Image (spheres, helix red, strand yellow):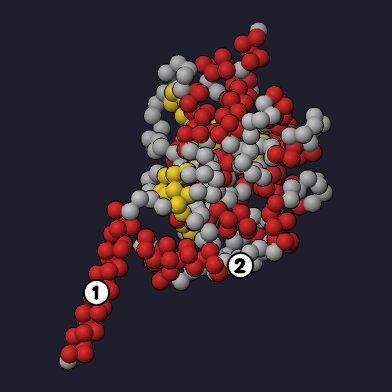
Amino acid sequence: MVRLARLSLSLLGAFVGLAVGEFALRSLAPPSPLMDLRGLHEVRPDRPWLYGLRAGAGGVINETGWVRYRINADGFRDRRYVRPKPSGTFRVIVLGDSISFGYGVYEVDAFPQRMEEQLARLAAEPRIEVVNLGVGGYNPYNELELLRDVGPTYQPDLVLVQFCINDLNDPTLHFDRQSRIHLGTVPDAAYPDPSVRRRGARMPPAWLRACRRSQLCSRLDDWLLARMAREPRDEERRAAVVPVTAGDGPEWSWLDRRYGEMAGAAAAMGARFALVAFPYPQQLDGDDPHPVQERLLAMGERHGWPTLDLLPAFRRAARERPNDALFMDWWHPTPLGHRLAAEEVVSGLACAGLLPPEADELCPRRVAR
């Protein structure tokens, strides 16, 4: 009997200790850096877009300097927007990956938010809103399915899709790197070339998913994951990083189909459709046209999709301000790069007649007349 009482007291003490630790981590201890962005994401087996941002999640990460990430109640890194759309509002929704999401920069510095800030200086009517639906690791497959599922609820007037060169690569490492969650089965349609896809990991067991709701358990899991995670092989890294520039493979026809489906979905909502092509740092040297942008522009012209190529503006900025970094890594712009992108996108949309007439003053060509 005494032994049982001692065991009960020991278990109670352990429970109280864990509860105190959990309370301290949640409310007393200052926010510590996340190991990665995993805590912001959740698997969505009930949705064709596979995974998304977890509503209400937040945290600090120090991969690129201290940055706080906050996810709104609708599951996006932005303020909440009224649905249905208020009358007298012109609404743009931005689909994209970690560039649109604003990886490595504050929320206010991401180019969709910079666009809205610039457009807010115009006349009050119609009010122009720019909704950031970017999710890290997404490619045109996820973006298409998110547009079909969530897009109509925002009643967009314009659907703007952000292109990054890794949209043409095997997305497995991008899914894994951004979300750090096990997606389970991923359909072949999500892969530009299904013949080179990696085998995905299985869904974690229920007890581990429950553990991740606890600060204490989640941090232990982070510690273990950092020590046990398998590093991708060289060929896997190459499949996720090296730009696909050749036009004779399946990747470009896959991209053409996905964008065509997005354009059709936008039209069904009564919205216009446009593309914005982000460059990558290795393209900034020289002045010759690049085959990636040339193919995107040709695709847009063939289908009638306005396509905004940011490469010329980034090249000019790199020459004029060589000491000001426009990128922090292979793909992601710095705050300066985001601001430059927002200015170019807004002026490009205004010149293409994709914004209300009040925005004409933002088109340099029209102002010069």
Residues tagged 1 and 2 counted as in contact (Cβ below 8 A):
no
Is residue 357 shown to the viewer in this render? yes
Q: Residue at x 48, y 44 (%)?
A: 66
Pick whichever, 310 or 301, lies toward us: 310
Residue identifier under label 1: 13
Which amino acid is tagged 1?
A: Gly
Q: Position of residue 43 (x, y in %)?
A: 48, 59
Q: Where is the N terminus found, in terms of image quarters? A: bottom left
Pick whichever, 251 or 219, lies toward us: 219
| Residue lying at the far bottom of the rendered structure | 1
Q: Residue at x 76, y 48 (%)?
A: 244
Q: Horizontally, is 127 left or right of 280 in the view?
A: left
Q: Where is the C terminus found, in terms of image quarters? A: top right
Q: Position of residue 231 (x, y in %)?
A: 63, 64
Q: Residue at x 43, y 26 (%)?
A: 89
Q: Position of residue 147 (x, y in %)?
A: 53, 44
Q: Horizontally, is 152 left or right of 177 in the view?
A: left
SS at badge 2: loop
Q: Position of residue 25 (x, y in %)?
A: 33, 57
Residue identifier under label 2: 230
Query: Is 342 above or below relative to 333?
Result: above
| Image quadrant where residue 346 sits | top right
SS at badge 1: helix
Residue 220 badge: none
How many labels, in total?
Answer: 2
| Image quadrant where residue 298 sits | top right
